[in-house]
Amino acid sequence: SYVLTQPPAVSVAPGQTARITCGGNNIGSKSVHWYQQKPGQAPVLVVYDDSDRPSGIPERFSGSNSGNTATLIISRVEAGDEADYYCQVWDSGSDHWVFGGGTKLTVL
Amino acid sequence: EVQLVESGGGLVKPGGSLRLSCAASGFTFSSYSMNWVRQAPGKGLEWVSSISSTSGYIYYADSVKGRFTISRDNARNSLSLQMNSLRAEDTAVYYCARSGIAVADFDYWGQGTLVTVSS
């Protein structure tokens, strides 16, 4: 089955840029979606199809995807961005949706 | 406003059954695929099952295949998950989620319902 690998934790100072990676075999050939989850809350879609933003999501959130790595990029990080972030893809080989293990973003 | 409200969670003994429901409002339910995603305490997200708009396509995670059954009632704007032969490892918050523009993304989520499997 398809596996997505995320770093368990990423730390960044306010105002800086956070980059959260999601590794998978030839993930560049798939569409990657990213979710933000704050403690005690349901996940929120922040990026879909590698780099598109749903309405209401700040432009500070963007994404890229190439080769074996997809990246969620959060510019001008704010304290309110502190959360767990998950990547997700549809694996056509198994007809399964797959989530990465999640990355805890800490704003220093 | 899109709303998804789960219900039916609770405490159940190993081997028991439970039926979860998700009431949808604020959108044309019959036009969207729907999904169940769960999250064990302190763990990450795990996809459980998905169903297409007309129930023509149904998918299950290997961990629940043969034990869980997803269904929908488009007339009642309702999604269900029948869970049988429950195990301790099924303990989790279960979220109902709508498939989005990209189909493979989940653009709206409910607040979840907790299922605890314990003797």
Image (cartoon, grey):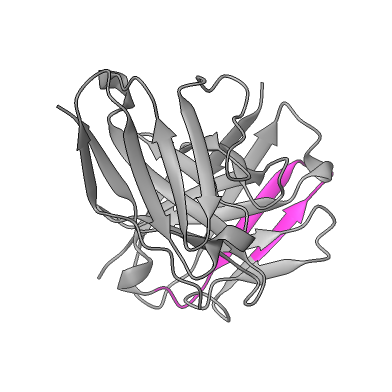
Where residue A58 appears, as percent x and y from the top left, is 50, 19
Relative to B29, residue A56 above or below: above
> Along the horizontal axis of the image, is B114 left or right of B82?
left
Left/right placement of residue A37 relative to residue B4 reads left
Q: Position of residue B4 (x, y in %)?
A: 60, 36
Residue most extreme to the bottom: B66
Residue A28 position in % (x across, y down): 57, 59
> In the drawing, does residue B34 fall left or right of residue B57?
left
Per the image, is B48 magenta?
Answer: no
Residue A42: x and y in percent read 43, 37
Residue B22 visible in the shown view: yes
x 77%, y 57%: residue: B52
Q: Give residue A23's quadrant in the image.
A: bottom left
Residue at (60%, 41%) from the top-left corner?
A: A48
Residue A75, quarter of picture: top left
Magenta segment boundaries in residue numbering: B70-86
In the image shown, does B34 or B73 lie closer to the viewer? B34
Q: Nearer the viewer, residue B35 or B116?
A: B35
| Quadrant that contains the C terminus of chain A | top left
Q: Is residue A84 left or right of residue B77?
A: left
B52 over A73 or under it: above or below: below
Image quadrant assignment for residue A81: top left
Q: Residue at x 52, y 44 (%)?
A: A64
Give whichever of B113, A39 is nearer the camera: A39
Queried whether the magenta region covers residue B79, the answer comes back as: yes
Q: Residue drawn 59% across and 49% down?
A: B21
Residue projecting furthest to the left? A108
Q: Look at the image and tell me whether residue B7 can be seen.
A: no
